[in-house]
Every structure is written in C-alpha cells, then in structure tokens.
Image (spheres, helix red, strand yellow):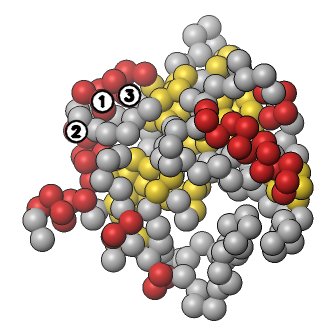
C-alpha cells in the first residue's frame, strides 16, 4: 500500500471539544424541510431522518416553497410527490430522505465561536477559515452563509458546510440479524454500532469532509482535512480517529 493509500484510509470523526473555552451556541433552524414519512406502505414505519442538511438548496423562488415550511409527516404518495418536486434543486448523488433539511440556518447566535463550530449535526466555520482550507487544496468545501442575529453588535459570519452523504459501515460491525432495508422507503432499524468501523471500499476520494451515508449525524474528515486544520491552527473542533477495514 502506498503512503497516499494509507492516508486515504485514515478517517476521523469531527466532535465538539469537551471542555471548550468557547461559549458559542446557535439557536437556529433550516428554512425548509422535506416532510417526514407517515405509515410507510412497505414497512408501516413513521419516521424522519436526522443529519441530512442541504443549506445551499435555495427554495426562495420555488413556486410551492410553502409546502416545505412546516415540519410534519405525510403519507408515502404525498411525500414522494414533494420529494420529486424539489429533486432538480438538489445536487446529484445527494439523498433525499424524510426530514431532510433545506436552506440556510436562520436564527440567533450567542457567545463566542472558534474558527470551526460543531453543533446539532452541523459543521460550520468562519468565512476566513473556509477560504484558508480551500487555498490549502481541500476538496468538497461548499459553505452556505447562515442568517443570524446576535446579542452583540456584530454577530459572527458563519457558514454551514453542505456535506455529501457517502461512505458505509463495514458489515462486520452491524448486527447479523438486522432486517434488510425497506424496499419502499429504505429505512433500516439498528443502533449505532459501538465501536463502529468503516468499509474502506466505500470511502470517498473527491471530498475531504463528509456525512456517513449509513448514519448522517456522523461527520467524518480525511487525514488531509485534519492536517490542514492543525497546520492552519484553526480551532473549535476536535478529531477522533475511527477504524477502517
């Protein structure tokens, strides 16, 4: 295995530092969302995902944007209609699951923030940090400005990264008796494996930070991303290496 191949297989989970000398907190929500699914005709489940955020998907000019403003469950036929109605707005390869969040985070910021900030399954960063990471050659960094007010005179200018969902758990860490995915809605029912490890063949080669497709609340970074953050002395998050097979 070459050094580049070895580096590609070093993956880290992005986490909030504990404790942290920053007090920053976001009290914000995405402007739109795909409804949850009620009573799937394939498996009977009523569910909504967590962690799928596409903040750069702008529905401002969409003629039926009001249909995505109120979070709620919908029957499958109506949910599928709403999904297909906005699919052209979403980048290719981005999953659209019940409860997917769309548009910029809008709300209030309080406290102090580092160069990066991890909260509520979202990774955000200051504009200057995004520009530094791009100049360092990192791939897949697409940020959308949050619409924030703050208690101070100048609320921080933070951008949420729009992260590609990709990568899979290695089958060896999953329950052997788990049910197959529902053929209608795709839902799977199992707890987060502890510890978990990743399938090396599924890891992306074109992005340096991403959401795990099998568990979108997990945000993962490559060795290149971690090295750049440390070299540039960007703070606000920590990294924990995860196993890859």
Q: Secondary structure at mark 1?
A: helix
Whole-percent x, y for residue 238 in the image: 41, 50
Distance between the Cα atoms at labels 2 and 1?
Answer: 13 Å
132 w.r.t. 166: above or below: above
Q: Earlier in the sequence, mark 2 or mark 1?
A: 1
Answer with left or right where residue 117 lies relative to residue 137: right
Residue drawn at (81%, 72%) of the image = 42
76 w.r.t. 207: above or below: below
* Residue at the spot of label 2: 231
* Cβ–Cβ under 8 Å for marks 3 and 1: yes
Q: Quadrant of residue 225?
A: top left
State the quadrant of the N terminus: bottom left
**Residue 123 or residue 181, whichever sits in front:** 181
Distance between the Cα atoms at labels 2 and 3?
Answer: 14 Å
Answer with left or right where residue 17 lies relative to residue 141: right
Count residues near mark 1 (Cα–Cα under 10 Å), then give few for <14, some for 14-19, many for 20+.
Answer: some
Is residue 238 visible to us here? no
Residue drawn at (63%, 91%) of the image = 177
Distance between the Cα atoms at labels 3 and 1?
Answer: 6 Å
Residue drawn at (23%, 35%) of the image = 137
Q: Quadrant of residue 122?
A: top right
Q: Earlier in the sequence, mark 2 or mark 3?
A: 3
Query: For residue 134, which numbered disc appears in the image?
Result: 1
Residue, far top: 153
Is residue 139 visible to us here? yes
* Residue at the spot of label 3: 130
């Amino acid at each position: 295995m070459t050094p580049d191949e070895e580096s590609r297989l070093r993956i880290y989970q992005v986490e909030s530092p504990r404790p942290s000398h920053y007090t920053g907190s976001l009290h914000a929500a995405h402007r739109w969302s795909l409804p949850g699914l009620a009573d799937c005709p394939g498996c009977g489940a009523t569910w909504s995902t967590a962690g799928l955020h596409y903040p750069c998907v702008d529905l401002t000019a969409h003629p039926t944007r009001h249909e995505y403003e109120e979070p709620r469950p919908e029957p499958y036929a109506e949910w599928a209609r709403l999904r297909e109605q906005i699919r052209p707005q979403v980048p290719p390869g981005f999953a659209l699951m019940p409860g997917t969040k769309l548009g910029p985070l809008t709300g209030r910021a309080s406290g102090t923030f580092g160069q990066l900030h991890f909260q509520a399954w979202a990774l955000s960063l200051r504009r200057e940090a995004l520009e530094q990471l791009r100049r360092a050659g990192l791939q897949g960094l697409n940020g959308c400005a949050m619409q924030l007010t703050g208690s101070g005179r100048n609320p921080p200018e933070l951008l949420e990264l729009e992260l590609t969902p990709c990568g899979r758990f290695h089958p060896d860490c999953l329950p052997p008796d788990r049910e197959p995915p529902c053929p209608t809605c795709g839902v799977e029912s199992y707890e987060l494996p502890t510890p978990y490890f990743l399938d090396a063949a599924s890891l992306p080669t074109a992005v340096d930070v991403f959401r795990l497709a099998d568990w979108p609340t997990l945000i993962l970074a490559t060795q290149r991303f971690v090295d750049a953050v440390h070299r540039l002395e960007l703070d606000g998050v920590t990294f924990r290496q995860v196993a890859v097979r």
